[in-house]
């Protein structure tokens, strides 16, 4: 089964549970004449397992710079928890359009960590 070429996974590291219901938006940078214009490529929400595996239809993307944005403020507000980063933006370079790119986000109220997953 083919999956989105870009996927993500959010883990709430304080609770030790998936970050479910978090809004996710994907943009491509520099894809227009205006370098600050960010066309929205896709949007979705993390599922009960904290994953967003269907952000884009299967297929190839262009080589270039992309940004994934997580609406962490709404996630923490819904749980009645404070947060310092209401939006987490991760900008990354997609070098090989044939590969799958997975972006994990380890999240707490006052810090986050990310890396290139598999």
Image (cartoon, rainbow, N blue to C red):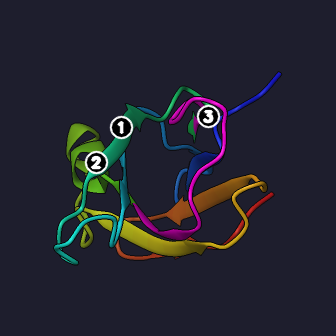
Q: In front: 94, or 23?
A: 94
Q: Position of residue 28 (x, y in %)?
A: 38, 61
Residue 19 showing in the rendered view: yes
Q: Residue at x 74, y 62 (%)?
A: 117
* Residue 62 among magenta residues: yes
Earlier in the chain: of badge 3 and badge 2, it is: 2
CB-based contact (under 8 Å), mark 2 and mark 1? yes
| Left or right: where 8 falls relative to 102 | left
Q: Residue at x 23, y 38 (%)?
A: 78
Magenta stretch bounds = 52-67
Q: Position of residue 1 (x, y in %)?
A: 83, 21
Residue of label 2: 40
Residue 22 showing in the rendered view: no
Residue of label 1: 43
Res 67 → quadrant: bottom left
Secondary element under disc 2, as helix, strand or loop, is strand
Q: Nearer the viewer, mark 2 or mark 1?
A: 2
- Specify few, some or many for label 2: CA neighbours under 10 Å numbering under 14, 14-19, or 20 or more: few
Q: Which mark is residue 53?
A: 3
Is the stretch drawn in magenta largely helix, strand or loop? loop
Q: CA distance from mark 3 to mark 1?
A: 11 Å
Q: Residue at x 69, y 58 (%)?
A: 97
CB-based contact (under 8 Å), mark 3 and mark 2? no
- Specify few, some or many for label 1: CA neighbours under 10 Å numbering under 14, 14-19, or 20 or more: some
């Amino acid at each position: 089964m083919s999956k989105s070429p870009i996927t993500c996974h959010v883990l709430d590291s304080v609770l030790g549970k998936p970050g479910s219901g978090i809004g996710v938006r994907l943009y491509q940078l520099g894809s227009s004449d205006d370098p600050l214009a960010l066309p929205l490529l896709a949007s979705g929400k993390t599922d009960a397992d904290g994953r967003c595996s269907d952000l884009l239809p299967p297929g190839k993307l262009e080589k270039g710079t992309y940004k994934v944005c997580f609406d962490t403020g709404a996630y923490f507000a819904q749980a009645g928890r404070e947060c310092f980063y209401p939006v987490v933006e991760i900008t990354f370079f997609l070098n090989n359009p044939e590969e799958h790119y997975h972006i994990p986000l380890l999240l707490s109220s006052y810090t986050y960590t990310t890396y290139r997953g598999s």
